[in-house]
Image (tube, grey):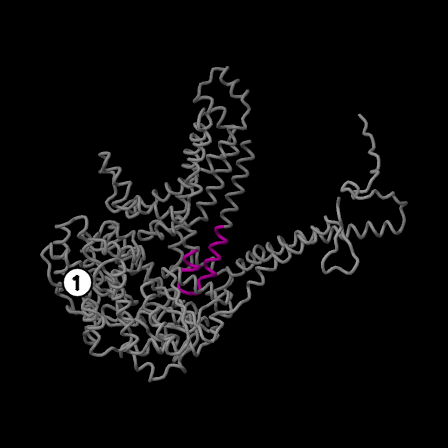
Amino acid sequence: MSTVPRPAPARTAAAGRGETPRPARAAGPGTGRRVLRRRTYEAVSGYLFVAPAVILFAVMGLYTVGYGFLLSFARWNGFAPHWDWVGLQNYKDLLWQNPAYAPRLHHAAMHTLYVMIAVPLLTVLVSFPLAVLLNSARRMQGLLRSVYFVPYVTSGVAVFFAWQYILQPDGAVNTVLGSLGMGSLSQPQGWLGNPATALPTMIVVTVWGAVPVAMLLYLTGLQSIDRSVLEASQLDGAGWWRTNVSVVWPLVRPITSIVVLLNLRDSLQGFQTFLVMTNGGPGDHTNVLGLEAYRLAFLMDLAPTLGLASALGWLLFAAALVIALINLRVMRSAT
Amino acid sequence: MHTPRRIPFAPSGRILPASRRIRLAAAAVAGVLALTPLAACGGSSGSGSSTSLTMWTFKQSHVAALKNAAAEFKKQTGISVDVQAYGPDDAYTTKVQAAAKTHDLPDVLEVHSDGEDFALGATGIVRDLSKDVGSDWSGLYQKGVQISGTVTPAHYKESVPSDSKSHGVKEGQRFSVPLTSGTFGIVMGNKKTLAAAGITKPPASYEEWLADLKATTSKDPKNGGVSLGLKVKATGLTWALQPLAFAELGKEKFQALWGKDASADFSSPDGQKVLADYAKMQPYWMPGTQTLDIDTADQAFAQGKSAWDIGGTFTLAFLQQNGMNPDDVMAFGFPGPQGGTVPKPALAPLALTGLAVSSTSAHPDNALKWMKFLAQPGVASKFAKDATEVPSTELGANAASVMGATLADMTQAFVGTPENTYDPNVADFRPPGYDQDSMAEILADLTPLKQKGVAATGKDMAKLNGNFWATADK
């Protein structure tokens, strides 16, 4: 098959906009200058258009990232005129050397690890079946999708306060358990007041906030599966359960990877829910790494611990990077 | 039909097509938008006008009283004061830090005395007032708080380590003048609930109080306990355990609990005794008090969800704000144990909050005028009534009538001798870099969380204290 060369445009671009057509001129030095001028003009206007984004990224992105990285090697309280350079001391202090910080960090790391295991797992376990059910709903699918999405659009400080009230000793959860004759399961100190239930409860609240997006992602994946594949499996005698486990689940594995990755990252770095609902308590039974970084940065009454907070932030970044790479690797090998 | 137009401000006669004009206009707008945030980084602080001031406070209960005083101040001087409240405390601290960075500080800041003011002074956020506050001014305050906000030799010693919060201050500098005084470690009881349980007078000892707690919780297991905002971690340690430990052991042995000597720290018999006494409160906590912050714990008390509340002299104003009549409150200092070294301990009054001038205030003289105005006895009396607070100004014989019966009862806890008075101001016996929140987290595991016994708690507290010393000695 041959390609027919396109004829040169008979009209200038301006003609398309209703301007009087101008005859094409012979190529010469004047034309070259004009082309050059036009290209320069286009290049300049292009740069001008991207300039705001570049400047914002340079100021808000590169500058702050670089600033934060340098800060992790300094001792500073945010206001003193000079930074005291301490080299890698902040990292050493956090990881093992300073007995005032390291044990706290280890404890917070353990809590974070529990959250990182439980939240992605539970989110997948809840959101995938929910998406399968929603996908098979014949009626009111749009309404149900909106209802399931409510936790995501309402998540915020006010909702976390509402959760606090629900979980109090005289809150809705204990009241419902009592009225159902399951009073023995209720928590007299509240679900956030008992060290044994505080962290699991926080995990449940986090999962509640994470399920809507995960479910929507699964729903997108389910709707993109070729129906002929499902029909073929049914013709081969696979039932509902077998189809979902052996056909649908492997096909949505990339989405599972994304859901797991997103939730791992949130579990590793997120702390807002913990700050509002427990402040790491009772005692320090729900302290997590993100919250510890926030505490070191802003809640130490101007103590020179900003460098420690920054170092902890970079450690979290490194951990997130490793997790992302592992996830990428697993995803590649699985698909 | 496309009609070319002249570009405004373009060289004369130059005509560009619409697409170019639109692109150029868009680029110009985008450029302006990009530069806007940068331009916003500039700015000034305080109020620009010479006849107006701005003041920030973290105490919502002070706002109305300060506004009343500001109205009077304007009448007398023509200077208006715009009082703004930001809370809770943590949010206020963050707000001040952010405003200092963006040069948007107000002229006057209300600060926690003898701590936060030094930290702000060390960082240059507030100015040194040592040359502005003479004896005619400081003499207006109660004797115990006249030098509040001043860097004493003890405060200077605490500031020397490079990781100290107040590192950089110099001895003799002054960063605030006191506004309110009082103390924490005040126990409050709901008179009606107590009367229903047969309690009509304050307990004479810790043991009597435990018996009273037993009576109220027996009468009403759900609402008869004691509330304390343990979500703010240090409250249990500083408002309850420390006064109790002082009464149990006396000043020297109390201070030794935070020393380097293992035979006298929290793992020692003395430490174990104090912790064992503190753990006796276990059956009487209000359910879920460990999940409440200070305000919500006080609210619970005001709403009748607890019969007792541990707070400070400043709590009464908040209770009143939440609908509780101060006359319905029985108040007394944290009682000492019968067999203790100081069975009848007193609580030293301390300046709770002070006033500081931001270093970037455009009108520091006006700010100082306003602060001195607030220290006048007549103004302070009105402030005390309006805010239900103990003012730092010496009110003389009128104090009881000005503050009301309950607040006056609270101030009875101040009456004592140097030997039997617990003074939370004195902190130089603790290791530099000491973090009371971490210590309090361990204590919470003893009670109310009941995760550890007395021995394990004492051992862990002593270990953490030793860690602070080890860090300081490095």
Total tally of numbered discs in the picture: 1
Residue sitting at 31 percent across and 46 percent down?
Answer: A165
> Is residue A300 found inside the magenta-colored segment of the image?
yes
| Residue B129 makes an appearance in the image | yes
Residue sitting at 27 percent across and 44 percent down?
Answer: A171
Across and down, in percent, residue B273 comes to 19, 61
Type of amino acid at the residue the image marks with label 1: Met
In this image, B398 relative to A293: left or right? left
Most foreground residue, B320 or B164 = B320
Most foreground residue, A233 or B249 = A233
Rendered view: B323 above or below A28 = below
Rendered view: B307 above or below A170 = below
**To which residue does mark 1 refer?**
B330
Most foreground residue, B71 or B395 = B71
> Is residue B463 found inside the magenta-colored segment of the image?
no
Main SS of residues in magenta:
helix
Quadrant where the N terminus of chain A sits is top right
Quadrant in the rendering for residue A300: bottom left
Q: Which residues are magenta?
A: A294-316
Across and down, in percent, residue B196 comes to 11, 54
Residue sitting at 42 percent across and 51 percent down?
Answer: A289
Rendered view: B277 above or below A177 = below
Quadrant where the C terminus of chain A sits is top right
Label 1 SS: strand
Q: Residues within 10 Å of mark 1 (few under 14, many from 20)?
A: many
Residue sitting at 34 percent across and 43 percent down?
Answer: A201
Across and down, in percent, residue A159 comes to 38, 46
| Residue B156 makes an appearance in the image | no
